Image (tube, rainbow, N blue to C red):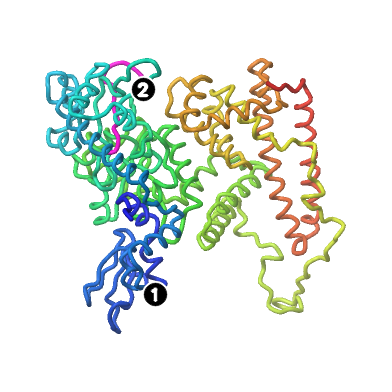
Amino acid sequence: MTISPAFLDEIRARVPVSAVVGRKVKLQRAGREWKGCCPFHNEKTPSFYVNDEKAFYHCFGCGAHGDVIRFLCEAEGRTFPEAVEQLAGEAGLPMPRETQASRAQQERLKGLVDVMAAAQAWFAEQLHGIAGAEARQYLQRRGLLPETVRRFGLGFAPDKRDALKTALLAKGASEALLVEAGLLIAVEERASYDRFRNRLIFPIRDGRGRIIAFGGRILGEGQPKYLNSPDTPLFDKGRTLYNLDLAAPPARKTGSLFVVEGYMDVITLAQAGLDAAVAPLGTALTEEHLRRLWRITPEPILCFDGDSAGQRAAIRAAHRALPLLEAGRSLRFVTLPEGQDPDDLVRGGGAGALTALAGKAEPLVDLLWRSEVETAQLTTPEGRAALRQSLLGRAAAIADRTVQDLYRREFLNRFDTLTGRGAQQTWRERPQENTAGWRGRGRFQPGPPPVRQETRVSLQQIRNPKIPPSTEHEIVLGLLEHPEWLDRYHEEIERFPYVDPEMARLVGHMLEASIRVPDLDKTRLDHTLTADGFGRVLAGLRTRKKQYSFSRGETNPEQAEADFVHVLHAVTRLYALDAELAEANAAIQLDDNETLLRPMRIAQERATIERELLDLAASGPALRT
């Protein structure tokens, strides 16, 4: 059976060597590696090391060396196909089956790799020819040296409809292959044409250095400013980081890896001597991006602009990382001066300007704390309670129970210090010296008050079934009708506790579009989401029954916006009340008379909010479109 190198690379990327070796060898942490006694020869002093970042094991005693696949073969006597099949199952990857179709697919992938290499050579040739004069002048203005241009394989696409197409067809490439590679755009009943025209070209490589896509920056006026290849059998933008192949070796050596926003940032840093820098490709950092970064270094440094858009991007990355955190795996954040990106900073102050900021990088826990406190209302008990609940919600998003518990304690300690509770111990927090309730100099400390079962209120008892469970769908419909709200209420929309995971994904793409797509309107938003694969979801949403003014679309804009904000905040508060109620019920047996009344007060507030939502939904006829 022929197994593609790309499939084997994916297994190595998903399955840590230590996880497999650790089943047979007792491993101990040794800096950034693991060590233990070699399973291939008898030894009493550990000389067997496992490096997850480099994805191999090595024994300094007997010389045994290999990756996770080879370990299964040599340590457990499995054949190569058996080892691959087992690891593919652990990685959640379906095993490729060798058929005539699969062999044809491998040949087609090889053809795609070859045609991308040919395209890069042609683009580079154009850059250094007559047509590339303007592009060369642009690179000179940006301060790029000729050797830097050659190192990154930069090129130029002339402003002609079929220049690349004509050149590659003459070399034997098929038009269908060029379309599949994303180099041509196919239009029904019309001739296909070059995707990249009048653009400076940036080759995008995979981890093995093969060219799998291109990015293009327009020269002169026009939109979009940057254009990437579409997803192809070779290229998945949600899994690819620009310059990862060149950045990984120096990053592993130094332990430092910068994540910046664009091609030019990466290239300028490399020219200044900071080779360990990567960038996502026209999208926010994904979970797969984060996993790939962590395989190289335990704490990548994310560099974002100091403006509001850059700070929102940093917070989104922090939230996305939470479920994936583990011991020794985190992020750090560098906030650049207002109006500057890494390119500007390094060209003005050299590599030292960025490394100085990196030395003071903000840990993930500090960024999360700051972002929550800056938006909190601390002047009222309700505002402080909302902050506390939000912090606990962030901690609860962490899947690793040990890290989750430590984040929870850290947030609660900071919250108590912030609100002045650190110096105030309640009776239940004070240590008791004996079980009889006597403490200190014969002073009696009363025990907990008796439980009043009649005050216990369960979530099921106060849940009002009249509130439609599809409210979050209507919130999304409102955003589709009014894309300008995405930026205006970005934080509130991102914080909303979506129950439907598909809605959460859709809103995440909408928020990203609000940042990367200029002058976003209904048409552009719809086109962007459809291109991202949400066409079916959008069609389903628009057939739903519409309860509120902002989703029905017949109300004046001011009223629609007011109703949208009201519903957004009201439903968010309902979920917070649910969490408070659960906490209050859990504390009833331990707390004083004041806390015994909390469930009843929560129920009353919840009922008030639900009545407001029902009144708002009943303010006009429900429509179905």
Left or right of 595, for residue 376: left
- Badge 1 marks a residue whose secondary structure is loop
Determine which quarter of the picture holds residue 624: top right
Residue placed at 68% from the left, 31% from the top?
Answer: 567
In the rendered structure, which segment of residues is drawn in magenta?
Answer: 212-224
Q: Amino acid at mark 1?
A: Lys
Residue at which label 1 appears = 24
From this view, report whether residue 33 is shown above or below residue 531: below
Residue 32 seen in this snapshot: no
Among numbered discs 1 and 2, the one appearing first in the sequence: 1
Quadrant containing the C terminus in the rendered view: top right
Task: Tell which of 279 and 378 is nearer to you.
Answer: 279
Q: Is residue 562 magenta?
A: no
Residue placed at 35% from the left, 46% from the top?
Answer: 100
Residue placed at 29% from the left, 26% from the top?
Answer: 175
Task: Tell which of 80 and 419 is nearer to you.
Answer: 80
Residue at which label 2 appears = 186
The local crowd at label 2, few if under 14, some if 14 to 19, many if 20 or more residues have their Cα within 10 Å, is: some
